[in-house]
Image (spheres, helix red, strand yellow):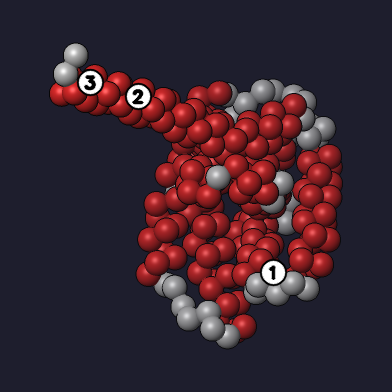
């Protein structure tokens, strides 16, 4: 066998291993992307299951819930546009506060609120106080899911674990606040201010959440943890105080 033939075989073998490595690399990348995607979606599924488990009376139409979640996913687009257009300088604490409360929080909660007003509030299925919480949480989870997928695909599983107990539940909590006050309006209780509060309260709790994180201070961590605990406990209180409430007696 000549040296030329040996060289050809060596190159064929090397080409084979290179092709095999490339193929397995694609499979590995596909597996990692699937794992990232699953990790990004799991918190949404868990929160949905928790919220729906407390629906004591008439179950909500699956088609309506899917519609709210889908439109919640779409709200990411106008939110990003608004945040880009109205972005401010955050070099000072005042600028950071404006960015957190009046740019990020207001933009994101406003687009969710519009979906809730246009679709959920006018739905004939909206006949219980707890329904408002379900609807607004589903909208918020649509937004949070898309946001979470983008973050996790970019930064990996470590971010998925962190956001599973912070950002995703936080968006659901903002939705609980929105739905609670919207239901007070829908039921005729505190009718004048309740509808305004259904936007104001999510913006306030969302803005403060972002402001604590974006300061970048180590000490902020000691504020953030009790704040998250407070948000969790307050939302659970809203849920427990409404999920056993009977359907509205009078409906307009």
Which comes before the other along the chain, label 2 or label 1?
Answer: 2
Q: Which residue is mark 1?
A: 212
Q: Residue at x 54, y 36 (%)?
A: 36
Q: Residue 66 appears at what percent x and percent y? A: 51, 29
Q: Would residue 84 be found to the left or right of residue 189 on screen?
A: left
Q: Would residue 173 be found to the left or right of residue 26 on screen?
A: right
Q: Residue at x 83, y 61 (%)?
A: 226
Give the vertical position of 98 relative to 184 (above or below): below
Q: Does the rendering let one see residue 244?
A: yes
Which comes before the other along the chain, label 3 or label 1?
Answer: 3
Q: Residue at x 57, y 77 (%)?
A: 96
Q: Residue 115 appears at what percent x and percent y? A: 49, 46
Circles 2 and 1, Cβ within 8 Å, touching? The answer is no
Q: Which residue is mark 3?
A: 6
Circles 2 and 3, Cβ within 8 Å, touching? The answer is no
Which numbered circle lies on residue 17? 2
């Amino acid at each position: 066998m000549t040296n030329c033939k040996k060289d050809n075989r060596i190159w064929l073998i090397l080409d084979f291993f290179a092709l095999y490595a490339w193929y397995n690399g694609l499979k590995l990348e596909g597996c990692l992307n699937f794992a990232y995607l699953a990790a990004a979606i799991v918190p949404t599924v868990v929160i949905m299951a928790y919220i729906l488990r407390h629906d004591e009376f008439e179950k909500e139409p699956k088609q309506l819930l899917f519609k709210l979640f889908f439109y919640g996913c779409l709200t990411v687009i106008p939110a990003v546009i608004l945040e880009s257009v109205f972005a401010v300088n955050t070099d000072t604490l005042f600028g950071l506060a404006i960015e957190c409360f009046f740019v990020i929080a207001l933009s994101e909660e406003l687009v969710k609120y519009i979906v809730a007003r246009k679709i959920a509030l006018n739905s004939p299925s909206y006949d219980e106080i707890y329904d408002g919480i379900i609807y607004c949480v589903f909208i918020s989870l649509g937004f949070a899911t898309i946001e979470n997928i983008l973050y996790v695909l970019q930064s990996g599983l470590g971010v998925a674990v962190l956001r599973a107990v912070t950002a995703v539940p936080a968006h659901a909590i903002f939705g609980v606040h929105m739905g609670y006050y919207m239901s007070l309006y829908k039921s005729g209780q505190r009718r004048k201010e309740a509808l305004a509060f259904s936007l104001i309260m999510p913006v306030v709790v969302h803005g403060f959440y972002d402001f604590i994180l974006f300061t970048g201070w180590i000490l902020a961590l000691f504020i953030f943890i009790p704040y998250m605990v407070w948000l969790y406990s307050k939302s659970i209180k809203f849920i427990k105080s409404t999920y056993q409430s009977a359907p509205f007696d009078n409906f307009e």
